[in-house]
Image: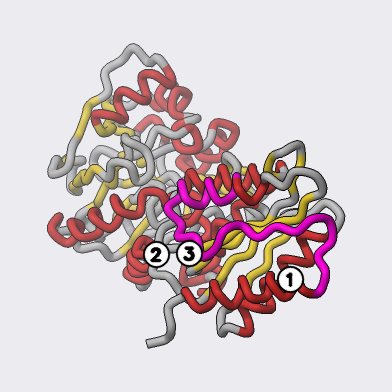
């Protein structure tokens, strides 16, 4: 019976059976301005296999897409590459309705799924180097621990060279197009960078090591099918190269100036600092937090060489929006940055000292001690702000 949903053919053996979430705007603190997709994949063979499921509210959509290709009860196996609920939320219901003979996951995935859902049924653990004959086709498994959860793994279909990469090489982007080559490259770069900066950045050393090992797995990768965003069926190497570039965190002459203000004084300081940065040959990106989200700040930092943070002092502390952003950034652990703090105060002025402590804890090289101004900056104080911008610009790498 027609359902209104159809699978999308990726290869003659592989079909996309996921769902598009145009309404998602928050992914645990990350602003998903363009929604997302929950990608699940059906592999046709003598033993049809489902790779991942979808977020629970979208399960019926997935089931309908499967039914547009085969009778769902014919599915023999389910592979869970990652136990996070946006990929496994519908898994218990899928198991109950599909009744697969086996469920596969990494060893840590087996533990996570049991702790999530309390199945009380065996889950077969697989590891790097293991393969699964599904009747006329072979799946190979590669563990990708901490990219981005301990249980993460990749599944590779040898016939057709399709790599099901779970959260690696994806992005949060809802669209009617299923393939990356159908979308503008600038859009892909922007959303892939935002995803990397907000999800994978703290794991960059692990990713660099993993990418170094990837050629040794002997996989002829022609298509990369991530669990979020479009599928890379052409030039899959492009997204791999971007991940290698972002993981390196090579500093540039871009400086991100993030701040909030109570009565405009800290904002005046930020603008003067930006003027000094520009005069010193740097690209200054000013991000007032009444207009910029913390995840956008993280994204700009991905290709930067400096972070300057401004805050008024409130109750002897950093202003709440600035403290929120700094907590978020500290968890993402950006590398290879120089920085400084600044801010206006009326009574005690502790904010810049607190910010300097935060920046030092983040291993950001301080160009100068925090610059603070009582109440409203005058011309001489704004000149000091401009000079701070010049000093930071001087610390940034010069073009080779």
Task: Name the mark on residue 364.
Answer: none
Magenta part of the chain: 354-379
Task: Report if residue 328 lies within the magenta region.
Answer: no
Q: Residue 249 carries which label?
A: 2
Closer to the camera, 305 or 117? 305
Earlier residue among tags 1 and 3: 1
Q: Is mark 1 on a helix, strand or loop?
A: helix
Residue at 39% x, 30% y: name it.
73
Give the x, y percent position of residue 186. 54, 74
**391 to the left or right of 170:** right
Query: What scheme was used to colour the molecule?
Result: secondary structure
Q: Position of residue 35 (x, y in %)?
A: 62, 51
Give the residue pinned by disc 1: 271
Tell me the residue that label 3 is attached to.
338
Alpha carbon of mark 1 to alpha carbon of mark 2: how far? 26 Å
Query: Can residue 204 be seen in this snapshot?
Result: yes
In the image, residue 382 sits, relative to residue 123, either above or below, namely: below
Considering depth in this image, is 213 or 67 the residue closer to the camera?
213
| Local secondary structure at mark 2 | loop
């Amino acid at each position: 019976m027609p359902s209104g949903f159809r699978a999308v053919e990726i290869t003659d053996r592989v079909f996309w059976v996921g769902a598009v979430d145009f309404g998602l705007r928050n992914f645990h603190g990350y602003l998903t301005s363009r929604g997302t997709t929950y990608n699940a994949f059906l592999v046709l063979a003598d033993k049809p296999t489902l790779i991942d499921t979808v977020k629970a509210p979208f399960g019926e959509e997935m089931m309908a897409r499967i039914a547009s290709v085969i009778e769902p009860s014919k599915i023999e196996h389910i592979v869970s590459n990652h136990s996070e609920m946006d990929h496994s939320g519908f898994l218990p219901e899928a198991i109950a309705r599909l009744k697969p003979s086996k469920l596969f996951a990494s060893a840590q995935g087996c533990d996570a799924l049991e702790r999530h859902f309390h199945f009380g049924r065996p889950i077969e653990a697989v590891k790097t180097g293991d393969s699964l004959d599904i009747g006329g086709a072979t799946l190979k498994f590669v563990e990708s621990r901490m990219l981005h959860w301990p249980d993460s793994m990749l599944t590779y279909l040898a016939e057709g060279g399709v790599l099901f990469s779970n959260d690696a090489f994806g992005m949060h982007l809802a669209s009617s197009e299923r393939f990356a080559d159908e979308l503008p490259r600038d859009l892909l770069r922007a959303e892939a960078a935002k995803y990397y900066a907000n999800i994978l950045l703290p794991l960059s050393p692990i990713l660099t090591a993993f990418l170094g090992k990837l050629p040794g797995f002997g996989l002829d990768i022609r298509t990369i099918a991530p669990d979020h965003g479009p599928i890379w069926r052409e030039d899959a190497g492009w997204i791999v190269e971007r991940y290698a570039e972002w993981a390196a965190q090579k500093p540039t002459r871009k400086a991100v100036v993030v701040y909030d203000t109570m009565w405009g004084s800290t904002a005046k300081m930020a603008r003067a600092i930006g003027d000094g940065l520009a005069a010193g040959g740097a690209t200054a990106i000013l991000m007032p937090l009444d207009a910029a989200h913390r995840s956008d700040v993280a994204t700009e930092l991905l290709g930067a060489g400096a972070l300057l943070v401004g805050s008024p002092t409130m109750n002897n502390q950093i202003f709440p929006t600035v403290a929120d952003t700094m907590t978020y950034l500290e968890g993402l652990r950006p590398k290879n940055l120089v920085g400084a703090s600044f801010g206006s105060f009326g009574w005690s002025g502790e904010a810049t000292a607190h910010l300097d402590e935060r920046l030092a804890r983040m291993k950001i090289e301080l160009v100068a001690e925090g610059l603070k101004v009582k109440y409203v900056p005058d011309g001489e104080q704004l000149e000091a702000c401009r000079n701070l911008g010049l000093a930071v610009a001087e610390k940034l790498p010069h073009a080779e």
